[in-house]
Image (cartoon, helix red, strand yellow):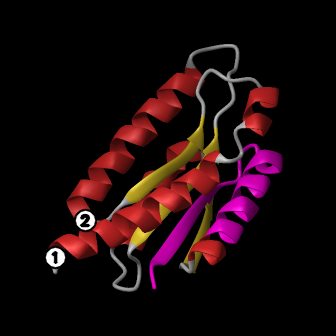
Amino acid sequence: MVKLALVVAEFNRDITYMMEKLAEEHAEFLGAEIKYKLYVPGVFDMPLAIKKLLEKDDVDAVVAIGCVIEGETEHDEIVVHNAARKIADLSVQYDKPVTLGISGPGMTRLQAHERVDYAKRAVEAAVKMVKRLKALEE
C-alpha cells in the first residue's frame, strides 16, 4: 500500500477544502493510505512542511494541495514559482515523489473552482510514481 502525506494550504480555504476532500476520496479509491495531513498558512509555506514529512520512514510520497489566485501585483507568480522550484528540489533530495496539486498562478476565483481536480491528479501522480519507482528497484 502506498503511504501518502498531504500538505494543504489554508489560504483560499473554501477552495483547498474541496481539493483536500477530492484528494482523500481518490487516495481511498486507489488503495493508498494518507498517513499524515499537515495544514500550512499558504503555498509559500509548504516546503518546510514537505521536508519534515519526507524525512518520515512511513511516507512514500507527499501531495501538495493549494490554490494561488491572481491579485493586483505579480505576487501570485512569485509564490507559485518559488514554491514549485523548492518542492521539486525536495523531491530529488529525498528521493521520494512530491506532486503538485497547486492551481495558479494567474487565475481568477472562478477558474480556481474549475481546477479543484488538480488535487485528484496530484494523488494519482504520487501513487503512480511510487509504484513505478518501486518497480525499478526490483
For mark 2, what is the residue?
A: 94
Q: Earlier in the sequence, mark 1 or mark 2?
A: 2
Of 79 and 21, the residue lying toward us:
21
- Residue lying at 61% horizontally and 46% vertically, measured from the top left: 118
Q: Would you say residue 49 is visible in this rendering?
A: no
Of 1 and 83, the residue lying toward us:
1
| Residue type for callout 2 | Tyr
Q: Quadrant of the C terminus?
A: bottom left
- Residue lying at 35% horizontally and 69% vertically, measured from the top left: 130
For mark 1, what is the residue?
A: 137
Of 26 and 34, the residue lying toward us:
26
The answer to whether residue 4 is magenta is yes
Q: Are marks 1 and 2 in contact (CB under 8 Å)?
A: no
- Residue lying at 40% horizontally and 58% vertically, measured from the top left: 98
Image coordinates for residue 42, horizontal then vertical, percent: 62, 47
Image coordinates for residue 128, horizontal then vertical, percent: 41, 64
35 relative position to 68: left or right: left
- Residue lying at 79% horizontally and 38% vertically, measured from the top left: 113
Q: Would you say residue 105 is visible in this rendering?
A: yes
Mark 1 residue element: helix
Label 1: few (<14), some or many (≥20) within 10 Å? few
| Residue type for callout 1 | Glu
Label 2: few (<14), some or many (≥20) within 10 Å? few
The answer to whether residue 6 is magenta is yes
Q: Quadrant of residue 93?
A: bottom left
Q: Quadrant of residue 59?
A: bottom left
Q: Check the image and report above or below for 38 versus 93.
A: below
Q: Which residues are magenta?
A: 1-26
Marks 1 and 2, Cα distance to the nearest angstrom? Answer: 16 Å
